[in-house]
């Protein structure tokens, strides 16, 4: 099975293991992956644009999750991204360029 673009963006920054955990059948594994990413965020490497892309992909996936705890855990990853000094190198437009933000908004409105 070929991973989708969202999975590839997540895997590029957070690695294959965490990308797989975010797609696990058990919600507790998905929540734990988000929590781990938030706790270790400063240790992940990637360009600021890659970080933004990976986190917005993670948020989009979590917003579609049937378990609210997974989305809440993903919001802590967003908080870590906002606090990361590497983000200063990327403008607000980076959030909009990939198209992930409008898709997250549409998912949230549907819920």
Image (cartoon, rainbow, N blue to C red):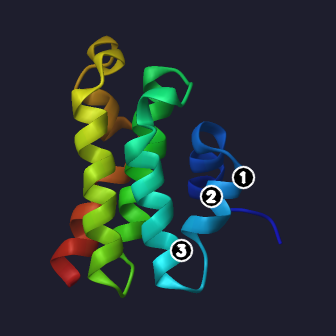
For residue 103, what is the image quadrant? bottom left
Query: For this rendering, which residue is in front, 19 or 105?
Result: 19
Looking at the rendering, in which quadrant would you find the N terminus?
A: bottom right
Disc 3 target residue: 29
Circle 2 SS class: helix
Q: Residues within 10 Å of mark 3 (few under 14, many from 20)?
A: some
Q: Residue furthest right?
A: 1
Instruction: For the residues labelled 2 and 1, say whether their Cβ atoms are less than 8 Å apart.
Output: yes
Looking at the rendering, in which quadrant would you find the C terminus?
A: bottom left
Q: Name which of mark 3 and mark 1 comes first in the sequence.
A: 1
In the image: residue 7, left or right of residue 57:
right
Residue found 36% across the figure and 58% down from its top: 59
Disc 1 target residue: 16
Residue found 29% across the figure and 38% down from its top: 80
Number of numbered discs overlaid on the protein picture: 3
Disc 2 target residue: 19
In the image: residue 3, left or right of residue 5:
right
In the image: residue 20, left or right of residue 47:
right
Q: Residues within 10 Å of mark 1 (few under 14, many from 20)?
A: some
Q: Distance between the Cα atoms at labels 3 and 2? A: 11 Å
């Amino acid at each position: 099975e070929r991973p989708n673009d969202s999975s590839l963006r997540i895997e590029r920054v957070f690695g294959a293991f965490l990308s797989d955990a975010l797609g696990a059948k058990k919600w507790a594994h998905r929540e734990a992956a988000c929590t781990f990413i938030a706790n270790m965020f400063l240790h992940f490497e990637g360009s600021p644009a890659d970080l933004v892309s990976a986190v917005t992909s993670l948020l989009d996936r979590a917003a579609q999750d049937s378990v609210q705890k997974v989305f809440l855990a993903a919001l802590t990853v967003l908080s870590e991204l906002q606090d990361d000094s590497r983000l200063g190198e990327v403008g607000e437009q980076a959030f909009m360029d990939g198209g992930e933000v409008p898709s997250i908004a549409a998912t949230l409105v549907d819920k």
